[in-house]
Amino acid sequence: MIEALPMLLVLFFSIVVHEYAHGYVAYRLGDPTANNAGRLTLNPISHVDLVGSIIVPLALVFSGSRFLFGWAKPVPINPMYFRQPMTGMALTGGAGPASNLLLALAAALFLRFASPSLGTGIVAHMLYYGILINVVLAVFNLMPIPPLDGSRVILPFLPAGIARFYWELEPYGMFLVIGLLVTGILGRIIFPFVTILRALFLAIAGA
């Protein structure tokens, strides 16, 4: 468990940034809902989800999973504030995974230009974790299953009937995600994409 602590810290920080990105983009597009709810903050206490932020990551650690991911409480967003609701939802949805890819890029660049002084210590390990964990978070959240971000991103491209079906499916979507996780199907779906993106960021890092 002690060895997993740096990974859990990186994961927790990354999912907090992920949720903040949703709220920030929504706020910039005219939606004050997250700000009014006190969620437009990097304070982790405001974003903790018992299942996604604690139980699932710990279960993955103790099971020896190759992947470590989780989620925070979704930031409240009201698309009625957006001039173009579907486009606004797509932009706010994509902001979370985009923030994770930016964190992975930042970790890679830091490793590339500061690695001689980092050596093989805990900071270097956390940066490598930062690449892998943020790539996993980005790929996982871009899956087009409500309420994951991918379902928001594709909304503007869907016919009205299918888009309405997506909204109605959202309360049950996370059960599907958990089922895919438990059966191991989730890992097989996202592993190829994670491998490609991780290799790209490691190349940037010069590793």
Image: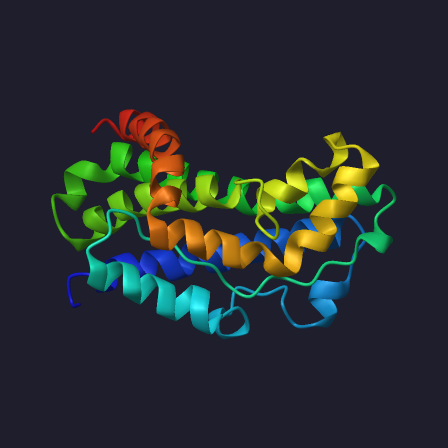
> Can residue 87 be seen from the camera position used here?
no
* Residue 120 rendering spot, x and y as whole percentages: 11, 45
Q: Quadrant of the C terminus?
A: top left
**In the current view of this chain or complex, which residue is farthest to the left?**
120
- The structure residue drawn at horizontal position 51% and vertical position 59%, both measured from the top left corner, is 175
- The structure residue drawn at horizontal position 81% and vertical position 39%, both measured from the top left corner, is 161
* Residue 64 rendering spot, x and y as whole percentages: 19, 55
Q: Quadrant of the N terminus?
A: bottom left
Front residue (pair 122, 31): 31
Horizontal side of residue 207 vs 183, given as left or right: left
- The structure residue drawn at horizontal position 49% and vertical position 75%, both measured from the top left corner, is 45
Horizontal side of residue 11 vs 174, given as left or right: left
| Image quadrant assignment for residue 119 | top left
| Image quadrant assignment for residue 8 | bottom left
Front residue (pair 176, 5): 176
> Can residue 153 be seen from the camera position used here?
yes
Horizontal side of residue 160 vs 207, given as left or right: right
- The structure residue drawn at horizontal position 24% and vertical position 52%, both measured from the top left corner, is 65
Q: Is residue 111 above or below residue 40?
A: above
Q: Is residue 177 above or below residue 39?
A: above
Please count the marks in the image: 0
* Residue 178 rendering spot, x and y as whole percentages: 44, 57
Query: What coloring was used for the rendering?
Result: rainbow
* Residue 82 rendering spot, x and y as whole percentages: 83, 48
Horizontal side of residue 59 vs 147, given as left or right: left
